[in-house]
Image (cartoon, helix red, strand yellow):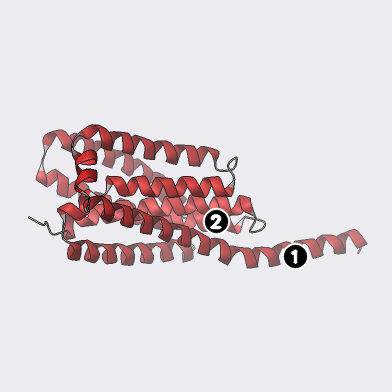
Amino acid sequence: MKFNDYSRIADDRNRELELTRAFPMLMRKVYTWMTMALAITGIVAYGVSTSQSMMAMLYGGIAPLLIAVAVEFGIVIYLSARIQKLSLVAATSWFIIFSAINGLTMGWIFAAFTIASIAKTFFITAGTFGAMALIGSTTKKDMTKMGGILLMALIGLIIAGVVNMFLHSSMMDMIVSALGILIFTGLTAWDAQMIKRMLMQAPDAGESAQKIALLGSLNLYLDFINLFLYLLRFFGSSRE
């Protein structure tokens, strides 16, 4: 065997060792960033609910909320498209800004529902999310096809939600909520598997891999928030 062959084998083993060391750290970053974003959203949302001026400004008309939602969509699209061209610091900053703006749009939750029911729903969401993320990360079954079906179902869910804004049907609202729970439960498992696959292909724990982990944490954050909101329709107790 030539010296170059030995050198190539040594390089391959070094890369495998580096991957073994990098992967757990990258996965920890995914869930650390997601937890950070959820904490920021919760703190901002609670702060908004305790401020009469903020509540009046955000919910006094539809325009402020529409602007906030449009900005959120813009940030998600921008991060997804430019993640590799942004620095890790810039990408993280945008994620923080997104989670804070989302907190502004969720202040109504603390005004509409009791703290006890919000806490109960949060723990139910955390348990469901954790179980599905674990399944997605550990199952050997390829969930690629299921992801395509879930994304199409998500589009249908959005359309049904918009239609019901005009129909105001309580029955349809419950159906949409139940479907939302099923869809985002499935998406949690699918996203967890996709994130694991992408990070296992990362050659090291450098900035490029960390940005992939950051984008993955954004996807899981969105899964958690949406799952929480749909579950809240079933478990939330009104303050009235």
x then y, percent, for residue 188: 39, 56
**On residue 197, which mark appears?**
2
Is 25 situated above or below 99?
below
Q: Residues within 10 Å of mark 1 (few under 14, many from 20)?
A: few
- Name the residue located 38 percent from the left edge and 62 percent from the top edge: 132
State left or right for residue 99 relative to residue 107.
right
- Can see residue 141? no
User: Which image quadrant: the C terminus?
Assistant: bottom left
State left or right for residue 54 relative to residue 25.
left
Count of numbered circles in the view: 2
Type of residue at label 2?
Arg
- Name the residue located 49 percent from the left edge and 59 percent from the top edge: 30
Label 1 with label 2: CB-CB less than 8 Å:
no
**On residue 121, which mark appears?**
none
Type of residue at label 1?
Asn
Q: Quadrant of residue 204?
A: bottom right
Element under disc 2: helix
- Name the residue located 19 percent from the left edge and 34 percent from the top edge: 61
State left or right for residue 198 relative to residue 57.
right
Q: Quadrant of residue 155?
A: top left
Residue nearest the observer in this picture, 182 or 45:
45
User: Which image quadrant: the N terminus?
Assistant: bottom right
Identify the residue position indicated by label 1 in the image. 14
x then y, percent, for residue 116: 18, 66
Badge 1 or badge 2: first in the primary sequence: 1
x then y, percent, for residue 76: 43, 41
x then y, percent, for residue 169: 10, 41
Residue nearest the observer in this picture, 144 or 200:
200
Residue at far left of view: 240
Q: Residues within 10 Å of mark 2 (few under 14, many from 20)?
A: few
